[in-house]
Image (spheres, helix red, strand yellow):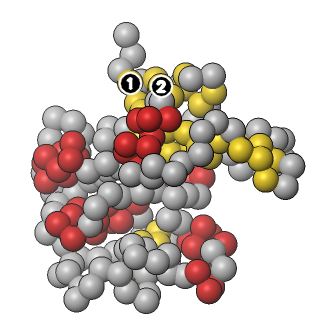
Amino acid sequence: MGRKTWDSIPPKFRPLKDRLNIIITRSAPPPSLPAASSSSSGLPSSVAAAAPSASTTAAGSSSAAAAPAPTTLYTAEPVRVPSLEHALQYAQAHAAALGRVFVMGGAQIYDAALRLPAARRVLLTAIERDFDCDTFFPLRLVDGEGDADDGGWAKRSRADLRAWTGEEALPDGPQEEAGTRYEFQMWEKVALK
């Protein structure tokens, strides 16, 4: 997540529980990581080989050899890195201890992550109300179809969402809270025909 997203989380909920929190901030010094070789997918070979088994919104680039693993990945302080690439390098280096990798914003982080070849799934809370705002999710995902430069996106079924998340109690269809309707959705990248 980006630093502004981290800052937007109330301090009593930081770090997010039971997960590795990686903050992307320009003020973080770059960790010393070795150079990586690239694969045909555009990802370095260490990531490209692991990408099919990692269920991620975006998987990234570079070598699996990074900073040594901390005693526990779920520490009181987040890991701070200077770029999305460094965040993905760190996650890849600790892939054996991690489950899925999620990208959770902000807008620039989403945009960069969705451009990666390994980006293949979006978990979206679709809000059916207009708000006065100036920042938007970089993909247009509506009516079961989405657009992107390198492929389209298809909305998956509620059963697919439940199976992927393991959340059997996931509510069906749109919900309403405080006058705002919303729906939990899962989208997957599909190749253009």
SS for dot 2: strand
Nearest the eye: 77 or 182: 182
Asked if residue 17 is positioned above or below residue 167 in the image, the reply reads below
Q: Residue at x 16, y 35 (%)?
A: 40
* Residue 189 left/right relative to 178: left
Q: For residue 80, say whether it is visible.
A: no
Where residue 115 appears, as percent x and y from the top left, is 42, 40
Which residue matches tag 1?
A: 190
Q: Residue at x 61, y 31 (%)?
A: 140
Q: N-terminal of the two: label 1 or label 2?
A: 2
Quadrant of the frame with the C terminus: top left
Question: How far is mark 1 from mark 2, CA to CA?
Answer: 7 Å
Q: For residue 106, say whether it is visible.
A: yes
Q: Residue at x 35, y 21 (%)?
A: 191
* Residue 20 left/right relative to 184: left
Nearest the eye: 19 or 176: 176
How packed mark 2 is, by other alpha carbons closer than 10 Å (few <14, some 14-19, many 20 or more), is many
* Residue 32 left/right relative to 187: left
Nearest the eye: 123 or 140: 123
SS for dot 1: strand
Question: Three-letter amino acid code at disc 2?
Answer: Ala
Residue 154 numbered tag:
2
Where residue 84 appears, as percent x and y from the top left, is 40, 60
Asked if residue 8 is positioned above or below residue 182 in the image, the reply reads below
Asked if residue 53 is positioned above or below residue 93 in the image, the reply reads above
Disc 1 vs disc 2: Cβ atoms closer than 8 Å?
Answer: yes
Question: Three-letter amino acid code at disc 1?
Answer: Val
